[in-house]
Amino acid sequence: MSTRRVLVLDAHTTQALACVRSLARAGYVVFVASSRRWALASWSRYCRDRFHLESESVGEFAALRKWARERGVSVVLPLTERSCVLCNAARSEWEAEGVAVGCETGDALLSTFDKARTMALAADCGVAIPPTRAPASFEECLAAAREIGFPCVIKSRFSHYWTGSGFVEGGGTSYVSDEGELEEICRAHRQGDAWPLVQGFVEGAGKGIFTVCDRGQPLMWFAHERLRDVRPSGSGSSLRRSIPVDARMLAPAEKLLRAMRWHGPAMVEFRDAGHGDPCLMEINGRFWGSLELAVRSGADFPRIWTDLLSGEPVSVSAPAGMGTTVRWLWGDVKRLLYIMAGTPSGYPGTYPTLAQGLAEVFGPQPPGTQLECWRPDDRWPAVGEWIQGIGELGAGAMRSFRLRGRRRSRRADVGVRTTAKSLGPPPALAAGTRPRP
């Protein structure tokens, strides 16, 4: 085991840090890579070396593959949709170097990344979903919204849409209260030819159920409840607690993953109002942001998946740490910023007040709450999360500043052209004289 070497991608994510710590304890030598400098997982004492990607592109991943080969890596673990797409696109090249790619292949992978296909699969399996339409034009978006009724939810089909040469970002989720704002929002969520989903709003709490599968066979199940979401309108969590697996979610999740013959990690996310069947929101076909909670609760998914990829004997035991609570501190800071920005336009649910947000960050936490990035034996990531987070805020502010500048420049340019057109040509030119040199 000690000779096994693993490359963990997307080192800026919390799930990467969980993988690095888990795999190092299991005896693996762990390397990391990220498109960000001083990424979170690279601060861990268990990180042997790191690679900085200049971009998330085919060419950079080829350079990464060469770097991994020189270090004897035998498994690569992509942890986001972008890296899964890029690794899967060059799977044969990785495998030719003796490196197992730790994500699903082809259609199965697309079935989890394309939300329209996910919803269609769920409907075929008899799993409850929100009222959903997958339009192919704005006219169909309008018809779908009228049929479903307002307020409705507009959701990008892909979090990251791959064009073959680059990614088109998804716009996440927006809420539309009337027809007047529908077209602008739908076009903002359009990715190439992929128009967004139109869905009905579903009340209830966001809940996830997690596993690693071996060709459709779940090896272990784990569940947690979200105590706070990073985005109060719905997202990954900043505070979560492990709970027993709910049979109401287990049955539909298992049905879906068996139908797909899923191979690898998966998070199946539901919205649960506490009565009736939970509604499927999405399937994440990769490791999830709250992975550290699972590991601390005894569900060591990174080790299970990497052992399976490496051909090692897979040892599985039921998680024992029910009631474990883990807080992502920087996630709570981000949540406070979302609260300060105000309720998203058209959002029909309840939204926390600024006083509540401040109390969440600075007030007492549930008894026994553990910090995600802090461990007594691995302290530096607790510093790294702040350096990385503040850097992200600065980069985001700079992007917003540049965007506003471009918009002002365009408006000024349009104003100059409009004024010039209304006034006619300059007098000297109008009179037929030559302009002065």
Image (spheres, rainbow, N blue to C red):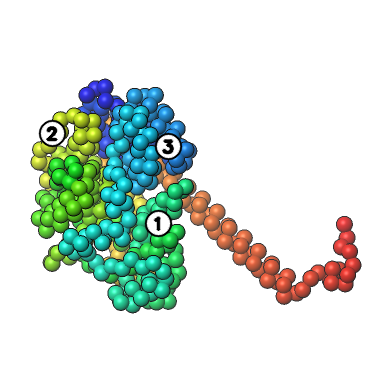
User: Is the residue 55 above or below the residue 150 in the image?
Assistant: above
Quickly name the residue at label 1. Answer: 170
Q: Residue at x 35, y 38 (%)?
A: 91
Q: Which residue is mark 3?
A: 61
Q: In the visual, does 398 lie left or right of 433?
A: left
Classify residue 159 by image quadrant: bottom left
Q: Quadrant location of residue 434?
A: bottom right
Q: Is residue 366 visible?
A: no
Q: Are marks 3 and 1 in contact (CB under 8 Å)?
A: no
Decide which of tag 3 and tag 1 comes sooner along the chain: 3
In the rendering, at what x and y percent does residue 213 appear?
Answer: 18, 43
Q: Give the foreground label among 2 and 3.
A: 3
Residue 300 visible (yes or no): yes
- Compared across the picture, whether 354 is left or right of 293 comes to right
The front one of 318 and 368 is 318
Tag 3 secondary structure: helix
Task: Spot the residue most to the right.
Answer: 433
Report the residue at 13% width, 67% height from top: 276
Q: Which residue occupies the foreground of this view, 36 or 77?
A: 77
Spatial CA distance of label 2 from label 3 is 32 Å
Q: Note whether 410 is above or below 178 in the view shown.
A: above
| Residue under the image location 34 percent in, 51 percent down | 333
User: Is 382 drawn above or below residue 136 in the view shown?
Assistant: above
Q: How many other residues sit within 10 Å of disc 1, few (<14), some (14-19) or many (≥20)?
A: some
Residue pointed to by mark 2: 315
Question: Residue at 31% of width from left, 37% of height from top?
Answer: 101
